[in-house]
Image (cartoon, coloured by chain):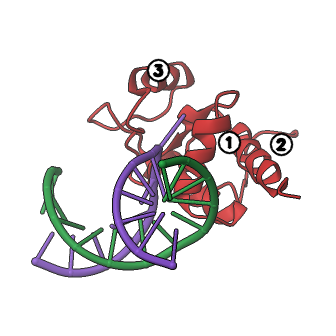
Chain colours: A red, B purple, C green
Amino acid sequence: MVRADEEYVERVLSLVEAVPRGRVTTYGAIGDVVGSGPRLVGNVLARHGAPVPWWRVVRADGSLPPSHHDEARQAYREEGTPLRRSGAAVDVAACFWDPADPTYPAGHDG
DNA sequence: TACTTGACATTTT
DNA sequence: AAAAATGCCAAGT
């Protein structure tokens, strides 16, 4: 049963979908939660990350992935994500959302 | 089996 | 701040 792949993929997508608006997470954080390196997360997002808000997933230093820059930028303006002075990156130090410790991601009444 | 690539991360210079 | 080198896990050739 090599289905482990699909489970792993769904796990990643689930976390990415769980990212609240105005916040972002990193490949490393997700990879650490699902139990794999950051590259696998990126790889999964590239294969099955289409139906999820991948723009909320950025590199460890906030810089956007080597593609979709414009698309992500557009989304951040809509979400109100704290972009860095550069404009081509996100203020991870301010809006970093931990997939392993979603203290207040939305959700219930709270 | 070995080499190379990939939506990355960390440390050192 | 930027570049180079190394580590990480998996897939393709």
> On screen, A95 above or below A85?
below
Looking at this view, is A110 or A22 the one in front? Answer: A22
Measured from the top left, where is residue B10 in percent x and y?
39, 72
Total labels drawn: 3
Label 2 CA crowd tier, 10 Å (few <14, some 14–19, many 20+): few
Mark 1 belongs to which amino acid? Val
Residue A97 visible in the current orientation: no
Measured from the top left, where is residue A14 in percent x and y?
77, 43
Quadrant in the picture for the N terminus of chain A: bottom right
Query: Which chain is home to disc 1?
Result: A
Label 3's element? helix
Query: Which chain is home to disc 2?
Result: A
Measured from the top left, where is residue A62 in percent x and y?
41, 46
Precedes in sequence: disc 1 or disc 2 = 1
Query: Which chain is home to disc 3?
Result: A
Say the numbered circle drawn on residue A16: 1
Left-right relation of A13 to A64: right
Q: CA separation, marks 1 and 3? A: 17 Å
Measured from the top left, where is residue A53 in percent x and y?
63, 31
| Residue located 87% across and 39% down the image | A109
The answer to whether marks 1 and 2 sit on the same chain is yes
Residue at numbered disc 3: A71
Say the numbered circle drawn on residue A36: none
Mark 3 belongs to which amino acid? Glu
Q: CA separation, marks 2 and 3? A: 31 Å
The answer to whether marks 1 and 3 sit on the same chain is yes
Label 1 CA crowd tier, 10 Å (few <14, some 14–19, many 20+): many
Residue at numbered disc 2: A110
